[in-house]
Image (spheres, helix red, strand yellow):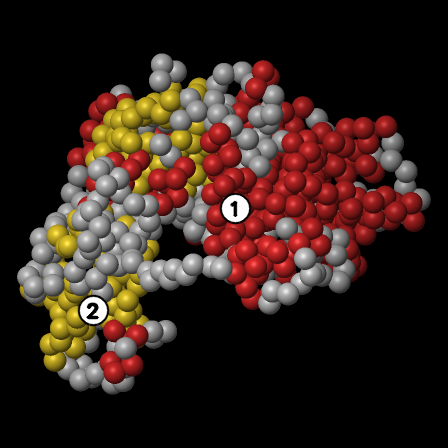
C-alpha cells in the first residue's frame, strides 16, 4: 500500500441542528469579513457548539490503489457524509482527504434524468453529468443500452418507462463509467433481485479491472462478497477497519450479547405506535433455560413477549433469523399458524416459536423482531436485537470431523432411501437392445 | 474521459479540506466540464417547448405579440418618438435583446435551486449552472432574430456594416445576465425572496432601458446616470448596429462595461465564496 489512492486524515463534518437564527447575517456579513482562518473557525465553532452535532469525526484511513473497500454502519452513522465529502459535494469541517486519480462517484442512479427526454437523450445527459466525455458515451452507447435491455424504447421519453426500465437504464450509464477511483453509495438498493445481482456482478468486474472502489451499502452480504476490507463507521467515528468477514461479524454482533435475552422493561415500539409494546425477546433451549448457546441436535424456541394496549383487528408477530454475514435464513410469523390469526384483545402475551431439532448448521445467528398489521401498519421493527449460537456437534449420532464444518446455513437430516437397483443392468441391456424399460426408470438414473 | 487509455491520464490529486480554497475559479476545471455545460444548455432547450403545439414558435411569438401591443399603445396612441424607425421594427429590435436578457436572468437565478437534487448528489463546478441558464436563452434569440430580419426586409431596411458589431452587444447582454445571475442564483439558494423579486425587477428594468422609447428621450442631465445601466447600452447598440439609426455608441459605453466587469468579477467571487455552503441550505 505504498501508493494510496485515497488518504483520509482526521476528517470531520459538523451539522447544525434546527433552524439557525441569523443565518443570513452569517453569510452576508461574515462571508466577507476577513479574518485569519484559525480565528474565524474558532468564532464559528463557539456559538455552534451548543446546537451542532458531528456527523463524522476524526476519521482516518488509507485505501491502496486497486483495493475494494466496503463501508458499513447503521443509518445515520455517517457513511453517506463520508462519501459526500470524498465526492466534494460537501466540504468537511475538520481534517483533510486526498484522492489520487480520476474520481467517479455514484451517490444515486439517474442523476439529472429528465422525464420528458428520451432514453437516448438521458444517457448522454446523465453520462455528461457523471463526467463522461461525449465521444466516450458515443462509443459505449450500444453497450449501455444492451446492458439495460431497453433497445426498443431508447427513443421513447423516459416518463413512459416502467420504474424497472428507468432504473436499469440509469444504472447502465453509471456502470460504464471508468474512473480510477469509484465511490459508490447504496445504488444497489434499486431494481429487482435479478437486476441487483447483475449490478453487483458489474461492481465485481470493475474491482477486477484494478480500480479502487469505496462501496457503501446496507447489503452486508454484497460487501462481504465484493470487498476484502471493510470499514465500520458508528456514531460518526471509525470503529473498525479490517478484513471484511471479521469487521462484518463484529458489526453484526455489536451490542448483541449471547445471554439469550433482550428485554425492554418500559416496552418498545415504532414511533407513533401506542397500541403495541414489545417487552422482550428470548431464546430458550430444550430444557426451557434462557440461553444463547444452543445444541443443534435439540429443538429450541424463540419467545416474544409483548403487550397489546388497544384492541387490534389483526396482528402478526414474527422473528427473522440471519447469519452473521447477512444471509436471511427464515422469517417466521405467528400468523403462519392459522389458530393465531383474527382480532386481538389487550393484554400481555408471550409468543413462542418452536424450532425443530437439527435445522440450523453450527454458527452465529442474529434475531430480528417484527410485529405489524400487514399492509396497514408496522408496529415494531427491530433489527438484530439478539444473537445465538448453534454449537458444532454435528447431526445427532454423527461425530464432527476434525476442524471441518459442513457447508450450508442449515444442516437438516433428510431421509435417504436406498435401494439396490437391479434395473440398472436391465436398462443398459434395454438401450443396447430393443426398448423395453419404462421411461420412469430411465429418469431415476 | 480518457479512462480507457491509462497512458493519457495525467496523475491528478484531489485535495479535500475545510478551507474554501482560492476564490478564483479553477478555469481548467471549468474547461474540462464544457461538455456538461453544452448538455445542460441542450437539455434546457430540448425540454422548453416539449409537448407544446407551437413548439419553438413561442420563442418568436412572445416578443412579437408584445411588439404589436407596444406599437399600438406607445406608438399609435401615445405617439412616443422612435428615431424615425417604423414602430414595429423599433420595438421588436429592442424586445429581442431585452427578452433574451430577461429569460437568461430568470433561468440563471433559478438554476441552483432548480438543480438542487443534482447539486446534492454529483460534483461539478457549480458555476456551470448559472452559466448554462444564461446560454440556454441564446437559441430563442436566434429564432426571433430571423423574424426581425424578415420584418426589416418588409420595411425595406438593409443593415449596414455596423451589423458586424451586433455580436458585441449581444455579448454585453449576456455578460450582464451572467454577472447578475451569479449573484442572484447563490442568494436565491439562501433566500427564496429573490425568486419572487425577479419578475418585478425584470419589469421595472425594461422601463429603465430604451425598449419602448429611444434613449434620446432621456433628458441630457440624466443621461450619465441612465447610461450606467449596461442593458441601455446593449439595446441602443443592438438597434444601431442593425438599423444604422440613432446615435452610434460613444465612449460613454465604456463606463457601464467597466461596471459590468466589476459586477461580473464580484459575482464570480461571491459565488465561489458561498457555493460550498449552499449545499447545506438548498
**Rendering coords of residue B244 (x, y %):** 83, 34
**Rendering coords of residue A136 (x, y %):** 65, 32
Whether the residues at callouts 1 and 2 have beta carbons within 8 Å, the answer is: no
- A30 up-or-down from A429: above or below: above
**Rendering coords of residue B50 (x, y %):** 69, 56
Element on which disc 2 rests: strand
Element on which disc 1 rests: helix
Q: Are marks 1 and 2 on the same chain?
A: yes
Residue at figure coordinates x 23%, y 30% from the top left? A58
Residue at figure coordinates x 54%, y 40% from the top left? A174
Structural crowding at the residue carrying mark 1, measured as other residues with C-alpha within 10 Å and reported as few (<14), some (14–19) or many (≥20): some
Which residue matches tag 2?
A353
Q: Residue A198 carries which label?
A: 1
Q: In this view, does A90 lie to the left or right of B218?
A: left
Residue at figure coordinates x 30%, y 74% from the top left? A336
Residue at figure coordinates x 58%, y 42% from the top left? A173
Work out which quarter of the rendered image holds the N terminus of chain A and state it: top left
B272 or A242, nearer to the observer: A242
B278 or A233, nearer to the observer: A233
Amino acid at each position: 500500500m505504498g501508493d494510496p489512492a485515497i488518504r483520509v486524515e482526521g476528517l470531520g463534518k459538523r451539522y447544525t441542528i434546527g433552524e439557525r437564527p441569523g443565518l443570513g447575517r452569517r453569510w452576508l456579513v461574515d462571508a466577507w469579513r476577513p479574518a485569519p482562518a484559525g480565528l474565524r473557525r474558532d468564532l464559528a465553532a463557539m456559538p455552534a457548539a451548543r446546537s451542532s452535532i458531528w456527523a463524522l469525526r476524526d476519521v482516518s484511513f488509507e485505501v491502496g490503489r486497486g483495493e475494494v473497500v466496503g463501508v458499513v454502519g447503521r443509518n445515520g452513522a455517517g457513511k453517506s457524509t463520508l462519501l459526500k465529502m470524498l465526492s466534494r459535494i460537501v466540504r468537511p469541517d475538520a481534517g483533510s482527504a486526498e484522492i489520487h486519480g480520476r474520481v467517479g462517484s455514484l451517490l444515486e442512479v439517474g442523476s439529472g434524468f429528465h422525464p420528458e427526454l428520451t432514453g437516448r437523450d438521458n444517457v448522454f445527459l446523465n453520462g455528461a453529468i457523471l463526467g463522461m466525455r461525449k465521444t466516450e458515451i458515443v462509443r459505449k452507447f450500444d453497450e449501455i443500452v444492451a446492458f439495460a435491455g431497453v433497445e426498443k424504447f431508447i427513443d421513447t421519453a423516459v416518463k413512459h418507462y416502467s420504474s424497472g426500465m428507468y432504473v436499469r437504464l440509469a444504472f447502465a450509464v453509471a456502470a460504464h463509467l471508468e474512473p480510477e477511483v469509484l465511490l459508490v453509495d447504496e445504488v444497489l438498493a434499486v431494481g429487482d433481485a435479478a437486476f441487483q445481482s447483475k449490478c453487483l456482478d458489474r461492481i465485481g468486474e470493475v474491482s477486477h479491472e484494478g480500480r479502487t472502489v469505496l462501496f457503501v451499502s446496507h447489503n452486508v452480504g454484497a460487501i462481504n462478497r465484493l470487498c476484502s476490507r471493510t470499514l465500520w463507521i458508528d456514531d460518526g467515528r471509525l470503529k473498525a477497519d479490517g478484513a471484511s468477514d471479521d469487521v462484518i461479524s463484529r458489526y453484526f454482533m455489536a451490542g448483541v450479547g449471547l445471554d439469550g435475552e433482550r428485554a425492554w422493561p418500559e416496552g418498545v415500539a415504532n414511533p407513533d405506535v401506542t397500541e403495541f409494546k414489545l417487552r422482550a425477546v428470548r431464546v430458550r433451549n430444550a430444557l426451557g433455560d434462557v440461553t444463547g448457546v444452543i445444541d443443534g441436535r435439540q429443538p429450541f424456541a424463540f419467545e416474544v413477549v409483548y403487550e397489546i394496549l388497544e384492541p387490534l383487528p389483526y396482528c402478526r408477530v414474527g422473528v427473522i433469523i440471519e447469519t452473521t454475514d447477512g444471509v436471511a435464513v427464515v422469517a417466521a410469523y405467528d400468523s403462519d399458524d392459522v389458530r393465531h390469526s383474527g382480532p386481538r384483545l389487550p393484554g400481555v402475551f408471550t409468543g413462542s416459536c418452536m424450532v425443530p431439532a437439527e435445522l440450523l448448521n453450527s454458527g452465529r445467528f442474529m434475531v430480528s423482531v417484527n410485529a405489524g398489521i400487514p399492509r396497514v401498519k408496522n408496529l415494531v421493527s427491530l433489527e438484530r436485537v439478539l444473537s445465538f449460537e448453534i454449537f458444532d456437534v454435528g447431526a445427532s449420532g454423527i461425530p464432527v470431523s476434525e476442524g471441518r464444518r459442513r457447508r450450508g446455513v442449515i444442516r437438516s437430516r433428510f431421509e435417504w432411501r436406498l435401494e439396490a437397483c437391479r434395473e440398472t443392468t436391465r436398462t443398459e441391456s434395454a438401450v443396447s437392445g430393443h426398448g423395453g424399460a419404462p421411461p420412469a426408470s430411465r429418469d431415476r438414473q | 474521459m480518457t479512462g480507457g487509455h491509462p497512458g493519457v491520464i495525467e496523475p491528478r490529486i484531489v485535495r479535500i479540506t475545510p478551507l474554501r480554497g482560492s476564490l478564483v475559479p479553477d478555469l481548467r476545471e471549468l474547461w474540462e466540464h464544457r461538455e456538461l455545460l453544452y448538455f445542460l444548455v441542450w437539455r434546457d432547450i430540448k425540454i422548453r417547448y416539449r409537448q407544446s403545439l407551437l413548439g419553438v414558435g413561442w420563442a418568436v411569438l412572445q416578443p412579437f405579440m408584445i411588439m404589436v401591443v407596444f406599437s399600438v399603445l406607445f406608438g399609435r396612441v401615445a405617439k412616443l418618438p422612435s428615431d424615425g424607425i417604423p414602430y414595429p421594427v423599433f420595438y421588436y429590435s429592442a424586445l429581442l435583446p431585452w427578452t433574451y436578457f430577461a429569460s437568461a436572468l430568470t433561468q440563471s437565478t433559478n438554476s441552483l435551486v432548480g438543480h438542487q437534487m443534482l447539486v446534492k448528489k454529483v460534483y461539478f463546478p457549480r458555476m456551470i449552472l448559472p452559466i448554462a441558464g444564461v446560454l440556454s436563452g441564446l437559441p430563442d434569440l436566434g429564432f426571433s432574430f430571423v423574424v426581425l430580419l424578415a420584418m426589416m426586409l418588409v420595411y425595406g431596411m438593409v443593415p449596414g456594416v455596423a451589423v458586424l458589431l451586433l455580436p458585441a452587444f449581444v455579448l454585453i447582454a449576456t455578460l450582464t445576465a451572467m454577472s447578475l445571475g451569479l449573484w442572484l442564483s447563490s442568494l436565491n439558494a439562501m433566500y427564496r425572496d429573490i425568486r419572487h423579486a425577479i419578475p418585478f425587477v425584470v419589469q421595472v428594468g425594461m422601463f429603465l432601458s430604451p425598449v419602448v422609447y429611444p434613449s434620446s428621450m432621456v433628458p441630457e442631465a440624466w443621461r450619465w446616470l441612465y447610461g450606467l445601466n449596461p442593458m441601455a447600452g446593449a439595446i441602443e447598440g443592438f438597434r444601431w448596429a442593425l438599423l444604422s439609426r440613432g446615435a452610434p455608441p460613444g465612449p460613454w459605453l465604456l463606463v457601464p462595461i467597466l461596471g459590468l466587469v466589476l459586477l461580473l468579477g464580484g459575482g464570480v467571487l461571491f459565488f465561489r465564496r458561498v457555493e460550498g455552503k449552499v449545499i447545506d441550505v438548498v
